[in-house]
Image (tube, rainbow, N blue to C red):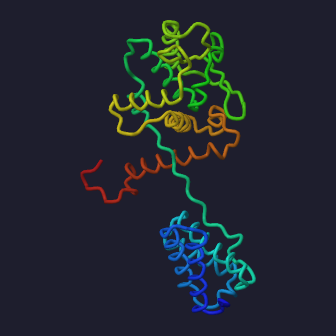
Amino acid sequence: MSAQSATDTREAIEAYLQYLLSERRYSAHTVANYRRDLFAALALRDDNWADLQRVDVQAMVAKWHRGGMAPRSLARRLSAIRTFFDFGLKRGWFSHNPVKDITAPKRDKPLPRVLAVEEAAALLDDEPDTPIAWRDRALFELVYSCGLRLSEAVALNLSTLSGSEAVLRVTGKGGRERDIPIGRRALSALEAWLACREEIANAGEQALFVSARGTRLAARSIQARLAGRAQKQGLTARVHPHMLRHSFATHMLESSGDLRAVQELLGHADISTTQIYTHLDYQRLATVYENAHPRARRTAPSDSDD
């Protein structure tokens, strides 16, 4: 078998698929996906695959991409073709692998879900009447006010509060420390929590936020308490601590437009990580524009429109 023609290539593909089933023990579902991907490629180039070049494969990828194939599906298809050529190389069917260094277009990272300012207010505004309720209010106000990661919130100690100053010292990823101003509402809630913290904290416990047992509050407990709070406050979104961090960053960027400052407040080592929030801001502005600007509306306004 030389794979010098479409017929030979079909036979080679079938031999490869049989190898995956019988020797590699791939599932029938996986092999069916490989079959579909390989024959889709053969449909575009059904002549001599021994002469297939990198540029030919790139043309295939471009055609599939223009046709709307998702990056994940493209990556799987390229993997199927690449491993088929590797198999053929070992059997002398091919002299090179034209897919060796070709990668699929990068997947677009999904933009994080953020709360609207009104949703954040609805989530945080309540009337605590117990130490646990004050703890939750202070905790979530602080996460939103300072853009904390969940792990950072869990690790907070009494010593991380900078004396009488409204500043929080946080140790983030890579052991990097940063000082973050505490907002007025968060500071007020934090002071109320500290006034009743001793009622439940164990003697000598250094954690800023403690459980009903008096020990450091665990990450899962924080997640569960926030989800329950969101549901109680009537929010339909599944709210998690990192959503508060995303919301902090987005709302800060909307207000200030200062990407570098937001990077420092979030503790990002690379500003490229922070730039995702510019996409969120542009997305929001685009929505406002489409809803408000007369030239952007999908239907023409009537004469009665102001």
Where is 289 relative to 140, above or below? below
Of the 4 image quadrants, the one containing the N terminus is bottom right
Residue drawn 66% across the image and 22% down it: 169
In the depicted view, which residue is nearer to us: 183 or 111?
Answer: 111
Residue 163 place in picture, x, y as percent: 65, 11
Extreme-left residue of the structure: 304
Residue drawn 64% across the image and 44% down it: 273
In the depicted view, which residue is nearer to us: 243 or 175?
Answer: 175
Tell me if 118 is positioned left or right of 140 in this view.
left
In the depicted view, which residue is nearer to us: 121 or 224?
Answer: 224
Which image quarter: residue 257? top right
Residue 267 place in picture, x, y as percent: 66, 34
Residue 153 place in picture, x, y as percent: 57, 26
Q: How many marks on residues?
A: 0
Extreme-front residue of the structure: 22
Extreme-right residue of the structure: 95
Residue drawn 57% across the image and 92% down it: 7
Tell me if 48 is positioned left or right of 140 in this view.
right
Residue 11 place in picture, x, y as percent: 58, 87
Where is 187 relative to 154, above or below? above
